[in-house]
């Protein structure tokens, strides 16, 4: 038997993951501050960024599973438009993941400026998701069949 995720359930689950990702971003930024003044070992930063990347990947996997059927069910957006939005969004996930992977290999040997740039991009991505996808205006139970 297949269970259907209600829009409000998807919103709640994904919003909780966003809170966790934001906490991890802040932690990585704190570590970057410590790295810049020599208080933090680069290996610690690399571990934290690797965990952030893994968490982001798991979030993306779930998000990419939950959002398409929920958003298509709220037909006011239109299936073609939703499909294109999701496709663009998945490409953005891939780009951010690649940036995080590159950062884990360069942070140990350079300043934290590249890391800070990737973290800012990731935060902006979460902001955009919350504005256009993970919003009670979009993921509403009253629009679902």
Image (cartoon, rainbow, N blue to C red):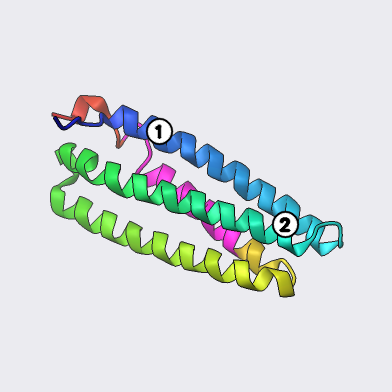
Tell whether position 18 is magenta: no
Look at the image and give the residue range highlighted in magenta.
Answer: 118-137
Give the residue number, with chain letter if any, for mark 2: 44
The reply to whether dot 1 and dot 2 touch (C-beta < 8 Å) is: no
126 in relation to 120, above or below: above
Counting the numbered discs, the total is 2
Disc 1 element: helix
Q: Residue at x 57, y 44 (%)?
A: 22
Residue 121: image x %, image y %? Answer: 54, 60
User: What is the distance, in whole Å, between disc 1 and disc 2 at their CAs?
Assistant: 29 Å
Tell whether position 131 is magenta: yes
Disc 2 element: helix
* 1 or 2: mark nearer the eye: 2
Query: Relative to the observer, which residue lies in front, 25 or 85?
Result: 25
| Circle 1 residues within 10 Å: few <14, some 14–19, many ≥20 | some
Q: Which mark is residue 109?
A: none
Q: Residue at x 43, y 49 (%)?
A: 58
> Which quadrant of the figure contains the C terminus?
top left
Ranked by sequence position, the earlier of labels 1 and 2 is 1
**What is the magenta segment's predominant secondary structure?**
helix
Q: Quadrant of residue 139?
A: top left
Residue 80: image x %, image y %? Answer: 15, 54
> From this viewpoint, which residue is outermost toward the right?
38
> From this viewpoint, which residue is outermost toward the top?
142
| Circle 2 residues within 10 Å: few <14, some 14–19, many ≥20 | some
55 in relation to 141, above or below: below
Specify whether 47 is left or right of 15.
right
Q: Which mark is residue 13?
A: 1
Residue 138: image x %, image y %? Answer: 30, 37
Q: Residue at x 54, y 64 (%)?
A: 100
């Amino acid at each position: 038997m297949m269970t259907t995720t209600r829009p409000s359930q998807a919103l709640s689950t994904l919003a909780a993951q966003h809170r966790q990702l934001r906490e991890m971003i802040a932690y990585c930024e704190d570590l970057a501050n410590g790295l810049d003044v020599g208080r933090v070992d680069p290996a610690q930063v690399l571990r934290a960024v690797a965990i952030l990347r893994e968490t982001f990947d798991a979030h993306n996997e779930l998000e990419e599973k939950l959002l398409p059927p929920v958003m298509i069910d709220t037909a006011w957006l239109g299936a073609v438009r939703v499909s294109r939005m999701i496709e663009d969004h998945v490409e953005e996930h891939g780009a951010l993941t690649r940036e995080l992977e590159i950062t884990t290999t360069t942070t140990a040997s350079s300043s934290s400026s590249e890391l800070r740039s990737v973290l800012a991009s990731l935060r902006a991505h979460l902001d955009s998701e919350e504005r256009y996808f993970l919003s009670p205006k979009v993921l509403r139970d009253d629009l679902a069949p």
